Every structure is written in structure tokens, then in C-alpha cells.
Image (cartoon, grey):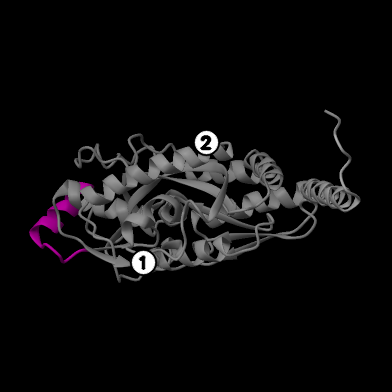
Amino acid sequence: MKRLPLPTSRRALLAACLTCAASAAFSTTASAQAYPAKPITFVVPFAAGSATDQLARALGQSISDQAKQPVVVDNKGGASGMIAAQQVAKAAPDGYTVLVTTNTTHAANEHLYKKLPYDPVKDFAPVTGLGKGGQVLVVRADAPYKTVADLLARARKEPGKLSFGSGSSSSRVAGEMFKQLSHTDILHVPCKSNPNAITDLLGGQIDLMITDTATGLPQIKGGKLRALGISTAQRNPLLPDVPTIDEAGVKGYDMGYWFAAYAPAGTPPAVVARLRELLVAGTRSAAAKAFYEGSGSVAWVTSPDELAKFQAGETQKWGRVIKAAGIEAE
């Protein structure tokens, strides 16, 4: 059967549609190729000086050197990272607003709060993992506790008298897990960020905390804080004489954390790919290596799909830990 030619109006419409599609594809490709063409903002959910902030600044410097564009670090501490996460979730999906975060916002918070102002999955495009690390149990250097056993003895003698601070979900859950596995009653005091909790600890407002090593180590090395235990199953090479909390008598204790980068949902895949390329190169930079080595953490990179799958597994794991620790959603 002979195919009749399309009416002129329909041919024109089809041509216009094809032209629009081609233009859109070209625009997206050109945009990705040009990225980044202006400053990038790294939104960090914790205060300046926190481990996440230190890593973000190291990566930002590397990306700035690579792409010849400034990288601005915007610290939005408070509300367990929810303020920062919400800001990025609502940002334009163009690759110029990036959340450099941890398991706090993307694995733990949905189990700690009844309602979040963002969806950890639907509102974000995973980019790559950035690192993994451990924490350290610290008290003031002038505190009477020389070991974890000393601390537990006081906690058991006077239930509810000691307090621990936390400025992230990792720190909070680490403290709650310590209570649960040691069968002690220690009061939790929420803080805006771990550096703020350190300030409260030094000032005597709280008695102890379990903080990321990057935040606690300078105070430990400076003689202001005493390290009693390492949160992970292995000792920290930067504190080789400090036993793990498990070794110190709280059997089964093992609690680490991770860093990752996310863009707003809807960010073009080509832009995500370029951003990932810049970040992965950043983890190999001298500044990032200094951070990893100086904090006892390690670089860890993934594809976007690998990060999404890892996040799903971590969300389930943190949910189990939080439930076992008896933490009720707020």
C-alpha cells in the first residue's frame, strides 16, 4: 500500500517537535560539558570545625583548583542536619548546590524523627561516597575517670547524674548505644553540632561525649580532653594506646560513620557524573589525604547507584540500632 504524504501542517509540527527535542538534548549536553561555569556551594549540615566541614573544605579546594571555579562552604548546623538537607532538597537541580553530609541526614534521621522536612531518597540524586571513620569517647582531662570502667562505675553508682552531649545523629546514637550495652542511665543533652558539644564538655556543662575523631583529636592532643575508648571494632592508629570500647568492657560495641555527597533530585545525569569526577579526584588531593590521615578516617568513593544501594542498607541498619537502643522518634 502506498503511504500518503503527511499533510503540510503535520509535517511542520513533527519537524518542530524534533527540533525542540534536539535542542533540549544539545542544551543538556552543552550544560554538562560547561559545568561548572560558576561557583559551587557545598552545604554542610554541621558547624565549622566539624569533620564534615573539614572534609568539605579540602574537597572544595581541590575542585576549585581543577575547575577554576570557587567552591563556597555554607555551614547550616542544627536540627540534626535537617536545615541543611531541606535547603539542598529545595535548591535548583543544576549541580551548583551540593550537600556534603553523613549518615545523620541520610540514614539515621528518619528513625529519630517522626516527620522530616525532606525525603532522604526522593529529594536527592546520589553522587558518591566520600569517606568512612570512627568516633572516640572523651571526658575532660581533669575528670576523675581514667578508663571506661571508671566511668561506668560512677554511672551505675549514681544513675541519671552523668550527661553526654551530641551534635549529630552518629554521636547521639553512639551515646545511646553505649548506655544500652552497658546498662547505664546517662542523660542525653542535644547540641547544635559536635564542636559545640566539645565546648560544652570543656566548660563542664556535660560530662562526656562520643565524637568524631577529627573534632576530638585536637583537644585530646592539646591535653584538654582524655580519650577513654574508640567506637569502632579496631583501634585508631592515631590513638594506638586507647582501647576500643568493646575491649574496655562494653562487649559488642561498634559504631562508625560515613560521608557522602548528594545533589538535588532532577540534576542531569551528565552533571552528576562530572561532579562525581571532580569529587573523586578531590579525595586523592593532598588536602583530603591530610584530612583522612589526620582524623583516622579513610577515603571511600562509589558510583551513584552504589551509594543509593549502600544508603538503603545503612538506613535499615541504623533503624535496627536505634530501635535496640530504645530511642523513640521525636
Question: Is residue 324 found left or right of 6 in the rendered image?
Answer: left
Asked whether the beta carbons under mark 2 and mark 1 sit within 8 Å of each other, the answer is no
Is residue 140 something one can see in this rendering? no
Quadrant into which the N terminus falls: top right
User: Does residue 154 show up magenta in the picture?
Assistant: yes
Q: What's the residue at 64%, 46% (across, down)?
A: 287
Query: Which amino acid type is shown beneath numbered disc 2?
Result: Glu
| Residue drawn where x is 68% and y is 46% of the image | 275
Q: Say whether residue 36 is left or right of residue 102.
A: right
- Please identify the quarter of the rendering in which residue 164 is found: bottom left
Which residue appears at 22% of the width and 51% of the height?
A: 325
Magenta region? 148-162
Instruction: Name the side, left or right, on which 168 lies relative to 63.
Output: left
Task: Say if 260 sits above or below 186 in the image.
Answer: above
Residue under numbered circle 1:
202
List the single residue furthest toward the left.
157
Place of residue 144 in the rendered image (x, y in percent of width and height, measured from the top left): 22, 58
Q: Residues within 10 Å of mark 1 (few under 14, many from 20)?
A: some
Marks 2 and 1, how far apart at CA:
40 Å
Most common SS among magenta residues: helix
In this picture, residue 42 sits left or right of residue 196: right
Q: Quadrant of residue 288?
A: top right
Nearer to us in this view, 169 or 316: 316
Residue lying farthest to the top in this orientation:
1
The answer to whether residue 113 is seen in the rendering is yes
State whether residue 283 is above or below residue 13.
Answer: above
Residue 91: x and y in percent read 61, 64
Residue 38 picture quarter? bottom right
The answer to which of 1 and 86 lies nearer the viewer is 1
Residue indicated by mark 2? 306
Report the amino acid beneath label 1.
Answer: Leu
Q: Nearer the viewer, residue 304 or 158?
A: 304
